[in-house]
Image: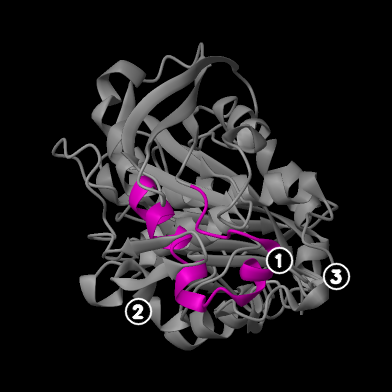
């Protein structure tokens, strides 16, 4: 695992215990209520039958918030299996942080009349599951935004996450934003022909789907990718695209961390007709080339060989911090006249430079103290811009306390410096 990630758990704990003056979406501090089996749509399955699509919705209790965040999770299962209940715990954990969370059904399956035919299905046949899932995800997000008044949620503060096929769905829902980028399997493909079947498969329609055309969009502010992948990293076009948090193991045999066919490490050549996928190890250099900041792209790339999570607490807390930092960024832009000092400090861990974004334009004082309480840096910063840099090149590697003080209030952060 990368060196910076070995220390994330400590940072997460320190971050969570210093949230007095920030938007607190890291601590799990609320009870929750579950609204189960909410029907959000009906659509045609691969075999022509209508399928009911449900979601389970979790909401915090006692947060007194009328502008809650929306966070939708999508389960995995190779587009042929899995249930929405697999994402229950993540929904619960984030509902306790103050989110309205939901875990959704989506249409599963494609024609595989026998195991033999399963091996011989072409790429386009097999990946009909992806565009259907993406269509359903768009419809589910529009549905969630359409009931914002009922859930006390904010339609402009929506996020999406998933695991495996669910994460593949979440990322294509987010980064496929033009009709020209639709997967080939969304178009008309050859008939299913067997000894007993000759079934036509027309085009599936727009990747954005038709469910819940209620005037809401399905746009999100960030994505949580848990061992998912993209069909092409070029779908992420600029550093202004939606921020991304990724988790992956380097030797994942199901969804490769780098660039391999789906199920590349499974026995019996079961993945031979899957497309090539670009996992988190391939996405990372793309983000670096585009110039994504540490605030807009973070990853945990763990040296392991399973399609799973090596440390659930680490993943949970670092994803929560990433989303909380994104929320801070949005709020610091949207409410610059806040009576309370708002600041985002990144990257964390830092090397030679720390960037501070605040909602104060008339000057702040930045102070840094070492673990023994010794003052190591102190400066008055006056800037006409809400973002400025300070140099930490002269400080030794270690854990420090950073204070940002204005005439409004004081904000405290723990930062780790690694040279």
Disc on the earlier residue, 2 or 3: 2
Q: Residue furthest bottom?
A: 289
Q: Is residue 115 above or below residue 13?
A: below
What span is in magenta? 108-136
Neighbours of disc 3 within 10 Å: few (<14), some (14-19), many (20+): some
Residue at x-position 75% and y-position 57%: 8
Residue extending farthest left? 215
- Relative horizontal placement of residue 110, taking residue 317 as reference (left or right): left
Residue located beneath label 2 in the image: 238
Q: Check residue 156 for magenta coloring.
A: no
Closest to the observer, 168 or 398: 168
Q: CA distance from mark 1 to mark 2?
A: 22 Å
Relative to residue 377, is residue 363 drawn left or right? Answer: left
**Residue 225 seen by the camera:** no
95 above or below 386?
A: above
Please identify the quarter of the rendering in which residue 354 is found.
bottom right
Which numbered disc, 1 or 3, marks the residue closer to the eye?
A: 3
Colour scheme: one colour
Find disc 3 in the rendering and name its residue: 305
Residue designated by label 1: 248
Callout 3: SS:
loop
Q: Secondary structure at mark 2?
A: loop
**Lower sequence index among marks 1 and 3:** 1
Residue 152 position in % (x across, y down): 33, 21
């Amino acid at each position: 695992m990368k060196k910076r990630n070995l220390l994330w758990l400590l940072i997460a704990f320190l971050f969570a215990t210093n949230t007095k003056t920030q938007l607190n979406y890291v601590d799990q501090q609320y009870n929750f209520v579950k609204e189960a089996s909410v029907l959000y749509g009906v659509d045609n399955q691969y075999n022509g039958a209508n399928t009911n699509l449900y979601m389970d919705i979790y909401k915090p209790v006692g947060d007194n918030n009328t502008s809650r965040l929306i966070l939708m999770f999508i389960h995995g299962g190779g587009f042929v299996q899995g249930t929405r209940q697999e994402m229950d715990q993540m929904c619960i954990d984030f509902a306790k942080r103050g989110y309205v969370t939901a875990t959704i059904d989506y249409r599963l399956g494609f024609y595989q009349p026998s195991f033999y035919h399963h091996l011989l299905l072409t790429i386009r046949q097999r990946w009909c599951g992806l565009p259907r899932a993406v269509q359903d995800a768009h419809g589910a997000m529009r549905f969630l935004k359409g009931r914002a008044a009922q859930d006390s949620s904010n339609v402009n503060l929506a996020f999406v996450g998933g695991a495996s096929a669910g994460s593949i769905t979440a990322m294509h829902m987010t980064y496929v934003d033009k009709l020209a980028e639709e997967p080939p399997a969304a178009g008309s493909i050859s008939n299913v022909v067997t000894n007993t079947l000759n079934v036509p498969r027309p085009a599936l329609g727009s990747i954005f789907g038709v469910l819940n055309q209620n005037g809401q969009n399905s746009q999100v502010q960030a994505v949580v990718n848990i061992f998912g992948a993209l069909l092409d990293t070029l779908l992420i076009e600029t550093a202004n695209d939606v921020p991304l948090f990724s988790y992956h193991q380097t030797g994942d045999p199901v969804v490769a961390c780098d660039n391999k066919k789906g199920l590349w490490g499974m026995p019996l050549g079961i993945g031979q007709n899957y497309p090539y996928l670009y996992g988190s190890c391939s996405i990372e250099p793309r983000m670096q080339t585009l110039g994504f900041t540490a605030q807009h792209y973070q990853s945990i790339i763990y040296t392991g060989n399973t399609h799973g999570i090596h440390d659930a607490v680490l993943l949970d807390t670092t994803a929560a911090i990433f989303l909380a930092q994104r929320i801070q960024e949005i709020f610091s832009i949207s409410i610059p006249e806040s009576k309370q000092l708002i600041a985002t400090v990144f990257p964390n861990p830092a090397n030679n430079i720390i960037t501070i974004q605040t909602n104060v334009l008339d000057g702040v004082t930045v102070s840094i103290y070492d673990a023994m309480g010794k003052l190591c840096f102190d400066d008055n910063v006056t800037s006409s811009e809400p973002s400025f840099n300070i140099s930490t090149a002269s400080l030794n590697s270690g854990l420090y306390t950073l204070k940002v003080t204005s005439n409004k209030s004081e904000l405290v952060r723990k930062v780790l410096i690694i040279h």
